[in-house]
Image (spheres, coloured by chain):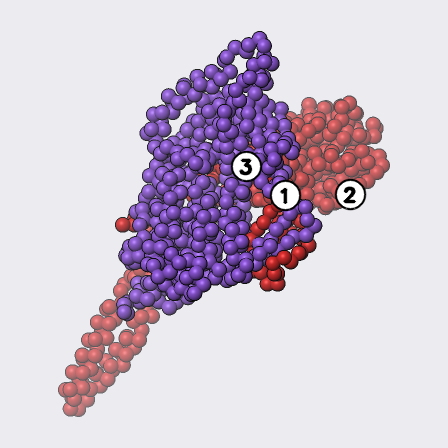
Chain colours: A red, B purple
Amino acid sequence: MSQFIDRRLNPKNKSAVNRQRFLQRFRGQIRKAVADAVAKRSVTDVDRGEKIQIPTKDISEPTFRHGQGGRREVVQPGNKEFIAGDKVPRPEGEEGGSGNRASDTGEGMDEFVFELSREEFLEFIFEDLELPNMVKRQLAREATFKSQHAGFTSDGSPSNLHVIRSMREALARRTALRAPSADRKRELEVELAALLTGGEPDEERIAALSEEIALLERRIRAVPFLDTIDLRYRNRIQVPKPSTQAVMFCLMDVSGSMDEVKKNLAKRFFLLLYLFLTRNYEKTDVVFIRHHTVALEVDEQDFFYSRETGGTVVSSALELMKDIIRDRYPSGDWNIYGAQASDGDNWPEDSTNCSRLLIEDIMASVQYYAYIEINNHEPHSLWMEYEKVAEYWPNFAMQPIYSAADIYPVFRELFKKQQA
Amino acid sequence: MSRKPLSEGSEWTFELLQSYDTEIARIAAGFGLDTYPNQIEIITSEQMMDCYSSTGMPVFYPHWSFGKQFLTVEKSYRRGYMGLAYELVINSNPCIAYLMEENSMTMQALVIAHACYGHNSFFKNNYLFKTWTNADAIIDYLVFARNYIAECEERYGVSAVEELLDSCHALMNYGVDRYRRPPALSITEEKHRQKEREEYLQSQINDLWLRTVPKKERYFQEQAHQFPAEPEENLLYFFEKNAPLLESWQREIIRIVRKIAQYLYPQRQTKVMNEGWATFWHYTLLNRLYDEGLVTDGFMLEFLQSHTNVISQPPYYSNHFSGLNPYALGFAMMSDIRRICEHPADEDRKWFPDLVDTDWTKTLDFAMRNFKDESFIAQYLSPKVIRDFKLFSVLDDDLNDELEITHIHDEDGYRAVRHVLSDQYNLGNLEPSIQVYRVDTRGDRSLTLRHYQHHRRPLGESTNEMLRHVRRLWGFKARLETVDENGRIQKSYECD
């Protein structure tokens, strides 16, 4: 009477649409959480999902229900000490009796926690940066692979059969399997020859020997010339597409005027370039150079989070970049990208140095150089000088930035080139 | 009677499922279980999570709250905090039950007995399900609902539909008729009538407002007959039929949510009975299989272990306590009815003179057919079960500083404990009683709801938010008055 149906091959993810609806609805909260996550993460660590927390009260679904108070009588199980008429103090908090179950996960009960997948996470970052769709797809795609020879395997498709290898295996197998019988046969043949040449031939023994030799011959013949276990196939494996390497220079002004907000914007800027580079190059180095009056190569932590005061000499950073390129990244082997963030402050006398350094030395060796000026409503001398650089070099981009959405235009040329 | 066991190992195959099902069906028929035909579907754990997150239905319209549900289930499952339920069963004809691929043969047999014969027979025969749900038509109706809502999303935008569904879901528990029997659902009929209904409804609603307002407004207001003439407790029904500004597609969506709420209503009222009945039967059926030598000792040990987990009842002071376990209480009561029929003690002769020495299958069958949790407990909770569970009642009155233990599991307390417990399962007491009281038809069209207090219990925190949903559906100012037992307004909420 019962009917059995195997539904295991039906598509799963029937709830994907509900998940999307959920993400859509709480877009605001999730974006904020993603922004916080980006601020906490390293520039080189944007390629994974993220745990998102949303206050439970924001996503609760209301119903009409009773509040505390009034008169309630409830039945509970497991009485161990009470008799009718006992009075007990009202337990703290909710619900008489139902023990407060503390969360042992380290997550508060008032936070709704879930995981964003890598794609969803990137999607939220990109949305913030207002990237065009083509670019989003390009950045979000996984690393590409190429198949490559990697020795031989014992199974595969006929088209990959390696004849010489297979024959060599067959020869070894035949030799090994026939050897015991062949040895024995040789012994018997010697004995038989002796008997036949000897005095009175022992007919019985001769017959027995002949029979055994015949048996051994059959056994030797039974070893097949080629067996399926001999077959060898060319093996191919997927390896990440080899491509050239890139180095990304992050230059940032850390003088007193660069506050947290500005630094966070700068971080988005570096992050986007990094994502672009990791998609296009197998190996991407990142060099962090911060500067005020002197420039210093630092690690990421110091780059974003240490505060300095004092004046600003931008050319110091460019000098250092030039030196590092010369010493460590000869431009024949490396694709060099420069990204500079500043609030535009510079010693007026220094700005010409900067443009000279860029025009004469650096721009010739870099693929692309992007400069953003954050929250500066009046262009200073540096901006003017950089405009000259942009005239000379088409691979120089500059842009004033007031919000995350302004970042993408700096890279527009870069992505356009990619698609062509 | 020793026969060859159906299987030895824990692996299941379709042939084995078939043979277990045949045997279980044979035994169930022997006990007189009356069931819909079964449609047993094997699914993966991912698919189970999908089913889980949309009220267990195979077809459902999309909504963000199901996404939230899914994320919750997924998270706890991935981290191993929670196993998925072994089964899901749908009150439809044929009765659809899901078995998870990961289950062992024992668990599959347990699920077949529990869902396909236990729940199934309950769905088919309990009076509430018979009255309120129509197993033949539900899947078709859900398909209709999903398509209709998808069409609306296309036409009026996802967010407009979502807003409306949010409000409807919030009021879902106030979208059921408790006393009237709803007409049967049928997809052809629904489609056929839908257009007609659209036009008709729209014309009806306007009529209410179209009367020209007379000059002596004040006079007429005093004289005006109250609308609605009788208070209406089915809020969604009221909005569907009377909210002035809704468009016909919005009325249709309200109707869909209302119909689904109505369909789920019996389940909410029969948790203890339904689970108790299914648990009692999987226990009885599998034991019979064992007695006939059709299953091995290993099978029984595995089965008993999960059975024991299912019916465990931690005491109130335990860390694992989360209220009365409906499986435990239901199973204990069902088993107890059988015990009273077969081996009554003197106490039982006094308490249940009608039950002792009757045929237990008939008695149990009668209980299953004619009760819901509230009445089932009031009728059948025996002193023995009260003692076994060590039940006691606690009075929490905000006029007193302390809680009072009112009754315990002793001679003086049995009746009272039974009464309190029965009340505890009365949905009417669990949810605040809220009804449409009045519409200001001549003035600002504002709507007044009334909350009739029970035991002075106030409304909870989300009331203001709820009122915004009421406001959204009604389209004009909404007001909610809490009225105490003497008819005095205690508190009022308002949403412009």
- Which residue is the site of mark 3? B433
Give me the residue at 50% from left, 35% from top: B174
Circle 1 packing at 10 Å, graded few (<14), some (14-19), many (20+), is some
The subunit letter for the residue under badge 3 reads B
Q: CA distance from mark 2 to mark 1?
A: 58 Å
Label 3, residues with CA under 10 Å away: few <14, some 14-19, many ≥20: some
CB within 8 Å, label 3 to label 1: no
- Residue B258 falls in image quadrant: top left
Location of residue A225 (image quadrant) = bottom left
| Amino acid at dot 1 | Gly
Along the viewing direction, whichever of B148 and A362 lies nearer the viewer = B148
- Does A389 sit left or right of B416 as displayed? right
Q: Residue at x 35, y 67 (%)?
A: B296
In the rendered image, residue A159, in percent from the top left (x then y), is placed at 34, 49
- Answer yes or no: are tags 2 and 1 on the same subunit: yes
Q: In the displayed structure, does residue A41 sit left or right of residue B474?
A: right
Q: Residue at x 85, y 36 (%)?
A: A310
The residue located at (32%, 66%) in the rendering is B291
Looking at the image, is mark 2 or mark 1 nearer the viewer?
Answer: 1
Question: In the displayed image of the protein, which residue is found farthest to the right?
Answer: A310
For the residues carrying marks 2 and 3, which lies nearer the camera in this image? 3
Q: Could you tell me the amino acid type at mark 3?
A: Ser
Q: Which residue is mark 1?
A: A70
**Residue B86 in picture, x, y percent from top left:** 43, 53
Left or right position of A203 against A28: left
> What is the chain letter for disc 1?
A
* B50 or A60: nearer the viewer: A60
- Please name the amino acid that badge 2 sits on: Ser
Residue B482 picture location, percent across and down: 61, 33
Which disc is residue A306 wearing?
2
